[in-house]
Image: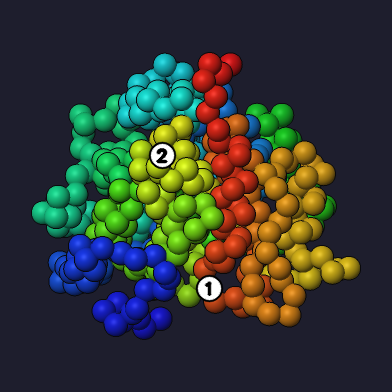
Amino acid sequence: MSFDLMSYEPRGDKKNSDFFGEYLPRIYERRSSSGIADQVGPMRAIVQQVETTALFDTLIELYVMTPYRHTATYLGQTHKFSVLHSHADYPALIVMAPLSPSFEDFIPRINRMYPLARNTPQTRYVGEIYGATDLSTLSKTLEDQNIRFEYDGDTENPFYTLNGFRFTTPSDFTCNRVGYSTLDFNDPDSLGLGDRVLLSDAEQTQLDQAAAFGADSKISPLMLGVDHLATRILAGEREDAILEFLTMVPYYFWGAYNIFDMNSSTNVNRNPDVDDDKKSPAKVFTANNTPSFINSFEQLPMPTEDFVRNFGRRLHHMAIEIQDGDHGAGEKNVDFVVTTLKDKGVPFLAHVVGECKDDPNLKQIFSKHSKNTLLITEYIERCHHYDGFFTKDNVAALTAAAGQDEQYQHGHVFD
């Protein structure tokens, strides 16, 4: 669609600094003049890492809780990789696990710094991969803008320097990476991840059973794809994280809202070049309004900053859009999906929040943290063509529910 970045007025009531107001349009202009806007396409893959023994359990979980289905598994030099797809136009999902639990790179090193991440040192969301046309030109252009990339010898995991890929170093503000690739993610054999590994008959049977649950219960057709990816960061790094991200990808700052009840703000960035966010999911950054040491004067809730202090800067949740519609007897589709998953034993943090009656609105809910990925899965139904991105009341309720589940108790870190 046609979209004028320079005339767009961001939505929301979160006041940004003069610094942000000055550099946002300059970043848009430089993206265009330097060719980045033309060289980088939509999101093509989402990458996460799990513990050595958790890869297959993660696949089962994804079958039950998302529309992703296994396409192929590969054995690389240091990691095993599984590639999953939900729709040809939506990002693939790459889940990797180190072959040895003692594997050392950035991920276990950063995880050990935080009390609620130490028990799963290999588990971390890695980042996204965006389509690109010319990796050499792209990396040279971004390096001139002080974006750092991984090269051979820089990292212990060779995945980040495979042919056809180019990954940034982890962001100082989010700890996420941005990757670029010229490859076709709908043809995973072309990715060069390693030797293809066939699942055992027992493993394939388990996946088939998980797929059958979704089909038989009729929830699978209602799970459409990834709506957004939400990262929690520190209060003072909100604007830097947004501007850094917008330097590297052709997204725009959609807007930011204060969630006063939770002493935080939600900051949304979207891709203007797609007609459906699921083709290149929105990137959301959530941060406290005040740093924890200042909040000690005010004694306001601060679940967002507590999460970062307990788990580190990292992705907090992945949202799955549920098809809008009435399932029957006054029940919306998201209610039906959640009730079915609860009956299957999937734990949730609270009840579905939001109302969808006659007016456009949202209904959404958070699952509990996955023991395999540490991520929350959000389910969101955009009712009656709701054109906003979220509602403040819903976000406040979801944030409060998650905060209750993310507390750190001294003396219980290693239980």
* Residue 334 position by quadrant: bottom right
Which residue is disc 1 drawn over?
388
Q: Residue at x 60, y 52 (%)?
A: 398
Q: Residue at x 68, y 64 (%)?
A: 354
Which of the numbered marks, if any, corresponds to residue 296? 2
Query: Could you say which is closer to the camera, residue 147 or residue 331?
Result: 331
The answer to whether residue 98 is visible is: no
The answer to whether residue 16 is visible is: yes
Q: Residues within 10 Å of mark 2 (few under 14, many from 20)?
A: few
State the image coordinates of residue 173 (x, y, percent, origin top left).
Answer: 30, 45
State the image coordinates of residue 370 (x, y, percent, origin top left).
Answer: 60, 37
Q: Amino acid at mark 1?
A: Gly
Q: Residues within 10 Å of mark 1 (few under 14, many from 20)?
A: few
Q: From what the image shows, is residue 36 above or below residue 126? A: below
Q: Earlier in the sequence, mark 2 or mark 1?
A: 2
Q: Residue furthest front?
A: 297
Image quadrant holding the C terminus, namely top right
Query: Could you say which is closer to the camera, residue 100 or residue 185?
Result: 100
Q: Residue at x 52, y 64 (%)?
A: 278
Q: Amino acid at mark 2?
A: Ser
Element under label 2? helix
Q: Residue at x 41, y 60 (%)?
A: 267
Q: Residue furthest right?
A: 329
Marks counted in the figure total: 2
